[in-house]
């Protein structure tokens, strides 16, 4: 299955998650109008999410992303986790 979701954060920035999944997340793309320093950390974020079971909670995803050493500017680890879990919950075949 494939799914997408968008989360608008407090500062008005948008975080989008595009995922492909079955029992686990097979592929994930995170994008939006935010900044991440260093930009290469986005690949690390996506790598940490890829392979997670689809029933992984928003809190668990956010905690997993705590290991990513980066400055999240205009968004947060929690907003990424929210976008991913919303995509899984709202996915369509």
Image: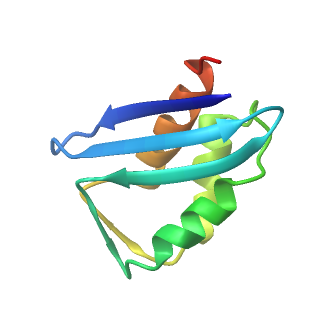
User: Would residue 87 appear left or right of 34 to someone viewing this image?
Assistant: right
Q: Residue at x 55, y 18 (%)?
A: 90
Task: Name the side, left or right, on which 15 lies relative to 63.
Answer: left
In the visual, does 67 lie left or right of 36? right
User: Where is residue 16 shown, x and y percent of the image?
Assistant: 39, 42
Q: Quadrant of residue 23?
A: top right
Residue 84 picture quarter: top right
Residue 87 image point, x, y percent: 54, 29
Residue at (76% x, 30% y) in the render: 55
The C terminus, quarter of image: top right
Expressed as whole percent of the image width and height from the top left, the position of residue 66 reads: 57, 64
Point 38% across, 77% down: residue:
39
Residue 1 sits above or below residue 66 on the image: above
The extreme left residue here reads 12
**Extreme-right residue of the structure:** 23
Q: In the picture, which quadrant includes the N terminus?
A: top right
């Amino acid at each position: 299955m494939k799914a997408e979701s968008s989360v608008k954060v407090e500062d008005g920035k948008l975080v989008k998650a595009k995922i492909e999944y079955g029992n686990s997340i097979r592929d994930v793309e995170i994008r939006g109008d935010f900044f991440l320093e260093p930009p290469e950390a986005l690949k690390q974020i996506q790598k940490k999410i890829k392979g997670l079971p689809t029933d992984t909670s928003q809190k668990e995803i956010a905690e997993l992303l705590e290991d990513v050493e980066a400055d999240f500017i205009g968004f947060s680890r929690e907003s990424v986790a929210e976008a991913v879990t919303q995509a899984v919950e709202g996915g369509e075949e």
